[in-house]
Image (cartoon, rainbow, N blue to C red):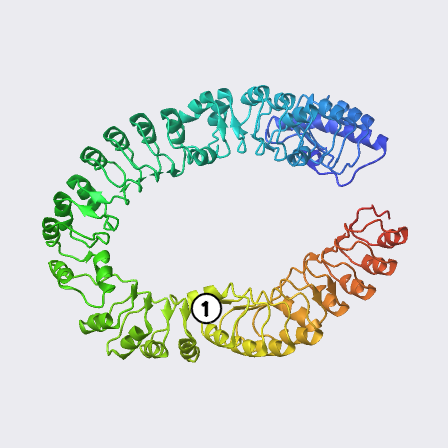
Amino acid sequence: MTPSSIRRRRSENRSRPHLLRLLVACLLVAGLVWGVVASRRTSVTKRLDLSAVRALTAERAVEIARFPGRIDLGGLATLSPAAAEALSQHKGPLFLDGVSSLTDAAADALARHRGPVSVAGMVIRSRAADAISPSVARLLARHPGPIELAGIVVLPPEVAESLAPHAGPLALPKVVQLSAPSAEALARHTGPLRLDGLEELSAAALASRLLADGQSNFDAVIDISPAAAAVLAGSPRPLGLAAMVTLAERDRSLTAARARLLARHSGGLSLPAVEELDASAASALADHDGPITLNGLGVLGPEAAAALASHAAPLRMPAIRELSDASAAELASHRGPLVVAGLVAIESGPLAARLLREGRWDFSAVTRLSVEAATQMAGHAGPLSLDGLEAMEPDVLAVLGQHAGPLGLTALARMAACLPVIDGPLSALLVLHSGPLPMPDLDSLESRPLAARLLADGRTDFSRLRTLAPDVEDECARTAARLDLRGLTTLSTAALATRLLADGRTNFDAIESLSDAAATVLAGHDRPLSLARLVAAARNQTTVSDLQARLLARHDGPLHLGQVGSISERTAIALSTHEGDLSLAGVTDLSPEAAAALLNQRGRLDLGGVICMPGIVEQTVARHEGELLLEGIEQLSSVELARKLVADGRREFGRLREVSPEAAAVLAGLDGTLFLNGLESVSEATATALAAHRGDLSLNGLQAISEPVALALAAHRGDLSLTGLVDPPPTVVQALASHTGPVFTPRSVVR
């Protein structure tokens, strides 16, 4: 006998005891030969492959246990206590990866095995268990690989103690709270430990152990002792502290100890309720590696500002409206990006210079500037937005007048735009600007005289405008220049709609509402248009008019009308001109006329809300040339529609409640597992058609079948799943027994 013959896999299980004893004897003799060879080839391992064994008596276990090398009994699903006791005497590696059910006595016996024990099946079985016994825990602790007990919420101390010797990774993702003895036991766990779902952390030793094992996810922790908090706060790497950060969002004040812990959070730190911050807490927060947002902080003293200056990531304090000179000077030296967008007054020249150096140009919240701050802004080479400035001292205005522009003066421009005539003082104020005067940043233009004035001045950029009065639209339609009105959200007149189309405009994405007259113009356009917001608004409509359908059909992208419950033939005709994908997933009833009209649509057609259709409608929609989606269909009768769905790539038919024999024959031609778990009943003819399916067949929705149906299904040549059957009569069970493949039912099928 050679070493290769020792390693050869046995192909079948010998049931007679004398043959087993002969096998063991041969293996023992072979072991002697292997010992000689192993001195030259150390990579060869003794192995007894009994993975084909499905049952093991205590006597056979005693004989097998004498084998000195690895024993693979992966085919066993369970072991008696006596057999387990016998195997526990084995001294080599023992693989019982198929075992998924053991008594505590058997588990205790295997846990005493003196060699490596692999029980992957028990690991898998225990993964979803909501509790395990100490005996099972002791056995799992012998498993060399990772263990995840995803179903356990409460971990008794004796189970924790039993798991402690486990040398592999141990994960308890749903354990939210631990008693002191359980925490102490887990802190001594030999292998890496993960407790991602822990909500209460009291033991400092456990906290230290988790950090040592590399756990950084403490996002679920909401209750932590001071000692454990101190341990986490001392972590050299960032930690996930999402729940504690969320709780801190309600705190109006912040202690230094709390700040030190929160500073270890790996993500952005937002503390919107904190209203005051002392220097010690600020110093602790400054160690945070990520962005800090203090939305509720309205006052910042010089000492706290100095402490925050060492923070190297973005610092956002949008609620601060004013700063003292000392605080502003300290913040000006902050190491990271600084966002103080809520400032209404900038009095510090150094702070203004700092903000400008960072690239800030939007000062639209500022209503007051000092001469020093204005001097810094005047020297800035790029554009600035000072849209909040409503009034300025003459000296500040004079300094800003030296800026090269452009300047955003929205408040002044809006004030002017609301008047039919700009008065002298306001005109003089605007003229003082030495650079190009920025165009007024208007949201709406309601005055026709003002519109005529702006057009006469050569203005063509109205891209920020959202609404125009109808007479202003008429004025814009008559101008010779091409206007930029991309920001309009309403369109009231046919004249302006016609003019925009004549100018080559196809992008109407910003339009949210328009009159019937304007809609008629756009609907009659011969090219696709972009109507993003109109299409988005139509998503929530339960009805759509014929005019609206004609308009939406011009959209050059997908069209989703998922809330529309029904459509008329005229509406269907209008929508059929749409050249992209069309979703009518809310339509539950489709007339033959509407179905015929939709055949002209070129693109994907989604009729996911249709549950059943008359045969004539099924045959009609089956002729649709684009992809057809019928995700909600529960009744399938026509061969044509079945072929269409299969041709379009449909492979999931789990929602079908009823299928004709002819359609079933089409579905039976699909490759792979055929899931028809929604079927509530099948005829003998349908069963015969389905039995021709070459893959596995799942009919778990059937609660009862007749003997003829069972006989028809028995002709199927693949796995057959009928787990929904309720108390099938013996005749049905007997009929299913003739099935040549596996049959899955609540009641075993005896062949």
Residue at left 29%, top 27%? 279
Residue 257 is left or right of residue 644, and the answer is left
Q: Which residue is mark 1?
A: 557
Image quadrant occupied by the N terminus: top right
Occupied quadrant, residue 436:
bottom left
Q: Dot 1: what SS?
A: loop
Crowdedness of circle 1 by 10 Å Cα count: few (<14), some, many (20+)?
A: some
List x then y, in percent, for residue 234: 40, 24
List x then y, in percent, for residue 187: 54, 22
What amino acid is at disc 1? Gly
Q: Is residue 207 above or below residue 627?
A: above
Residue at left 23%, top 70%? 450
Q: Nearer the viewer, residue 374 or 642?
A: 374
Q: Is residue 424 above or below residue 23?
A: below
Regarding residue 63, the answer to whether it shows in the image is: no
Residue 381 is left or right of residue 320, and the answer is left
List x then y, in percent, for residue 52: 75, 38
Occupied quadrant, residue 735:
bottom right
Residue 574 is left or right of residue 401, and the answer is right
